[in-house]
Amino acid sequence: MNDLSKNGSWFDNSTKLGVIANIFEGRTLANFEVCQEDQKFMDMIDSNMHLHATELAKKLIDYANKELI
């Protein structure tokens, strides 16, 4: 799991990550938690938490569709 306080408020980041997970699972039907076992997936989350939730979700969806699903 990533460090939610690394890029700002823990609460704000955990809320945002929940939104991202919902978007991701709705679009891919894949389990977000299982995808977090992939290091590149986690690195993408950590390095892109500054993006809007929908933008980050799209990046993760694109990566998962190409590499994980």
Image (spheres, helix red, strand yellow):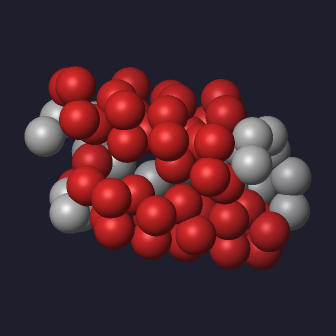
User: 39 left or right of 13?
Assistant: left
User: 15 left or right of 31?
Assistant: right
Position above or below: 7 against 25: above
User: 43 left or right of 51?
Assistant: left
Visible in this render: residue 15? Answer: yes
Residue that appears at 75% across and 40% down: 51
Residue that appears at 49% across and 34% down: 59
Image-quadrant location for residue 7? top right
Visible in this render: residue 14? Answer: no
Q: Foreground residue, 6 or 57?
A: 57
Quadrant where the C terminus is found in the figure: top left
User: 11 left or right of 55?
Assistant: right
Q: Position of residue 18 (x, y in %)?
A: 55, 71
Image-quadrant location for residue 64? top left
Q: Foreground residue, 43 or 18?
A: 18
Q: Position of residue 12 (x, y in %)?
A: 80, 68
Residue that appears at 46% across and 64% down: 23
Q: Foreground residue, 54 or 1?
A: 54
Q: Position of residue 31 (x, y in %)?
A: 23, 63
